[in-house]
Amino acid sequence: DQQVKQNSPSLSVQEGRISILNCDYTNSMFDYFLWYKKYPAEGPTFLISISSIKDKNEDGRFTVFLNKSAKHLSLHIVPSQPGDSAVYFCAATGGATNKLIFGTGTLLAVQP
Amino acid sequence: GAVVSQHPSRVICKSGTSVKIECRSLDFQATTMFWYRQFPKKSLMLMATSNEGSKATYEQGVEKDKFLINHASLTLSTLTVTSAHPEDSSFYICSARLAGGPGTQYFGPGTRLLVL
């Protein structure tokens, strides 16, 4: 049972344009959501998070949007840079658990 | 801030030996640390939750006698792979959660284990 889903395994974007990565979840008890960036053979790097009491959180080029009614969140990166090329994981936590439940990741390729 | 280190970064060992991996939170205290395993082209698989001063909580299907976890202090957790076999070869990643924090986990750089 995949509680957190990233339906796009990969995404290719031109440098300077917007990258939009999507994530859906099924567990209504989740109340905190995170995005991580990961390079091969490295640990994930925390990017940005959002609490369920908000619908938007912005940090520099990164903005996370949360639509609780649709159980959907997205990460916007603008403008995209070649150094943003990596695998992006969304994760969720909440309710009785302190575990992070990860999506399967989306490989972002930003073309120069 | 929120830096997590892992040691070693890479280890090669013979089948049957035990390997210890250390995970340290360098600039914060972590009452809870987590151990993950990542298979090629797969998402992170949570192996166990490590709580300072108490026994680890293992996920279903993870052998606790094979993957020994010790969380001796607020900044150190260790994972020992006992009697390692080639199928234990993998990328092991730890994370630490800020005490009292909202849930953000900060990850170490990972340890590549190769069992010959």
Image: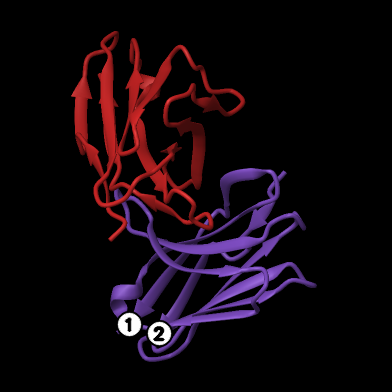
Chain colours: A purple, B red
Instruction: Name which quarter of the figure residue A60 lies in.
Output: bottom left
Q: CA distance from mark 1 to mark 2?
A: 10 Å
* Residue B115 shows in this picture: no
Which residue lies under the disc numbered 1?
A81
Do callouts 1 and 2 mark residues in contact (Cβ within 8 Å)? yes
Chain letter of mark 2 equals A
Q: Is residue A71 above or below residue A81?
A: above
Do the residues indicated by labels 1 and 2 lie within the same chain of the protein?
yes
Where's the C terminus of chain A, which quadrant?
bottom left
Which numbered circle lies on residue A61?
2
Amino acid of disc 1 = Gln
**For marks 1 and 2 on the same chain, the one whose residue lies earlier in the sequence:** 2
- Residue pictured at 65% horizontal, 79% vertical: A55
Secondary structure found at label 2: loop
- Residue pictured at 43% horizontal, 39% vertical: B31
Task: Identify the residue at the far right of this view.
Answer: A69
Amino acid of disc 2 = Arg
